[in-house]
Image: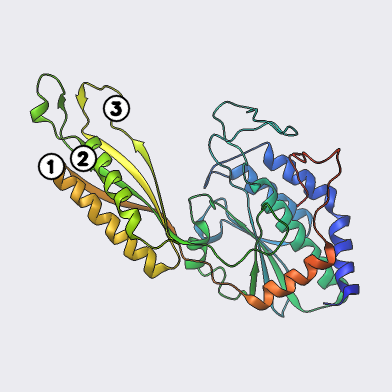
């Protein structure tokens, strides 16, 4: 793309900025968790209609997934957006210190209110660029739900909605202005449900078999495993069900959720097998049973060097974001997409 053409498409972006800033603000005000983004999806669908896209709702059988397409023939350019929030990150806009709107409520802590708005803004500019220049090509905006722990894109891939796509582009806010290295670990998120036998912890502790003990032993075993796994791997866990709050009862159930990350799928699957063996060992030690349940999973990212180089060239033309002393906190609810 020549410097002149590049300048033209950025003019198209700037012409739409206020409408898409407003969209980002609206999404900020309605933070919804993964697969529950009904209002957010509806807002993006309404913007797609307003901008003249052909719309497909309920993509891949997911009620909150949407796709808008414009143009005819030629290559298919996919621009991916997201709009799910995270629990416990409710935050008042415009201030640089923690101040929840609703204590314990949802919030867009990592810019997901921006992701859909910025991506749809880009798709709209490409749409108008193709129209003005009479170019063959189709641009698609994919509204992808459940990026945070839901892996919706995997289900969308399985349903074939990207089969004819020639290039797919996404973005995410970061602490620097640049093109990300193509590094994103393969991962699996898994629940381990332990079942034991309840009893009174004082009167008849010998009759009980503690599922909570099994969870604790599993966590200890995985922590000992950390010395003996690749340095690129990561393992995280959270106890999601302790079986109750009474300390004088042997807990008959308990659940721990694990997130296992590794450089690629074979490495991740090898770690998963080891973690599963530790879970089985914890159950054996406590005379409980364990059942595993996969919550989500993603393959590792595969880079596209020519596309990354082209994006970097355009970023060099644009320059980094700027701020002044007045705008340095820059915590507006619609930071510039």
Assign a secondary structure to mark 2.
strand
Tell which tag, 3 or 1, sits nearer the viewer. 1
Assign a secondary structure to mark 3.
loop
Q: Quadrant of the N terminus?
A: bottom right
Position of 295 with respect to 219 (left or right) is right
Image height of 8 relative to 148, above or below: below
* CA distance for labels 2 and 3: 13 Å
Residue 243 x/y as whole percent: 28, 31
220 vs 12, nearest the viewer: 220
Position of 35 with respect to 280 (left or right) is right
Residue labelled with disc 3 = 244
* CA distance for labels 1 and 2: 9 Å
Residue 251 x/y as whole percent: 22, 31
Residue labelled with disc 1 = 287
Residue 34 x/y as whole percent: 52, 46
Classed neighbour count for the residue bearing mark 1: other residues with Cα under 10 Å, few (<14), some (14–19), many (≥20): some
Position of 1 with respect to 80 (left or right) is right
Q: Quadrant of residue 164?
A: bottom right
* CA distance for labels 3 and 1: 19 Å
Residue in the picture at 89% in, 68% down = 8
Residue 268 x/y as whole percent: 38, 63
Dot placed on the residue nearer the N-terminal end, 2 or 3: 2
Dot placed on the residue nearer the N-terminal end, 1 or 2: 2
Residue in the picture at 56% in, 31% down = 105
Image height of 269 relative to 17, above or below: below
Assign a secondary structure to mark 1.
loop
């Amino acid at each position: 793309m020549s410097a002149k053409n590049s300048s033209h498409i950025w003019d198209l972006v700037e012409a739409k900025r206020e409408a898409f800033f407003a969209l980002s603000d609206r999404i900020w005000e309605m933070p919804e968790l993964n697969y529950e983004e009904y209002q957010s999806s509806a807002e993006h669908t309404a913007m797609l209609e307003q901008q003249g896209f052909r719309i497909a709702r309920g993509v891949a059988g997911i009620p909150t997934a949407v796709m808008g397409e414009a143009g005819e023939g030629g290559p298919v350019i996919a621009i991916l957006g997201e709009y799910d929030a995270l629990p416990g990150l409710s935050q008042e806009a415009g201030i640089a210190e923690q101040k929840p709107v609703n204590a314990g409520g949802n919030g867009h802590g990592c810019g997901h209110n921006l992701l859909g708005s910025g991506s749809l803004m880009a798709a709209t500019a490409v749409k108008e660029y193709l129209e003005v220049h009479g170019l063959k090509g189709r641009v698609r905006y994919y509204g992808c739900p459940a990026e945070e722990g839901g892996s919706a894109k995997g289900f969308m891939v399985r349903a074939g909605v990207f089969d004819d796509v020639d290039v797919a582009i996404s973005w995410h806010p970061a602490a620097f202005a640049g093109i990300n290295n193509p590094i994103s670990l393969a991962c699996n998120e898994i629940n381990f449900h332990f079942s034991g036998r309840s009893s009174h912890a004082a009167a008849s502790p010998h009759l009980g078999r503690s599922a909570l003990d099994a969870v604790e032993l599993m966590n200890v075993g995985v922590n000992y495993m950390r010395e003996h796994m690749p340095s690129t791997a990561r393992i995280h866990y959270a106890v999601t069900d302790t079986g109750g709050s009474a300390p004088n009862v042997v807990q008959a159930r308990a659940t721990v959720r694990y997130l296992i990350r590794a450089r690629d799928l074979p490495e991740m699957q090898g770690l998963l097998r080891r973690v599963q063996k530790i879970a089985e060992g914890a159950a054996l030690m406590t005379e409980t049973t364990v059942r595993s349940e996969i919550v989500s999973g993603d393959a590792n990212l595969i880079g596209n060097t020519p596309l990354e180089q082209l994006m970097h060239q355009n970023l060099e033309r644009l320059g980094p974001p700027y701020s002044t002393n007045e705008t340095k906190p820059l915590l507006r609810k619609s930071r510039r997409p």
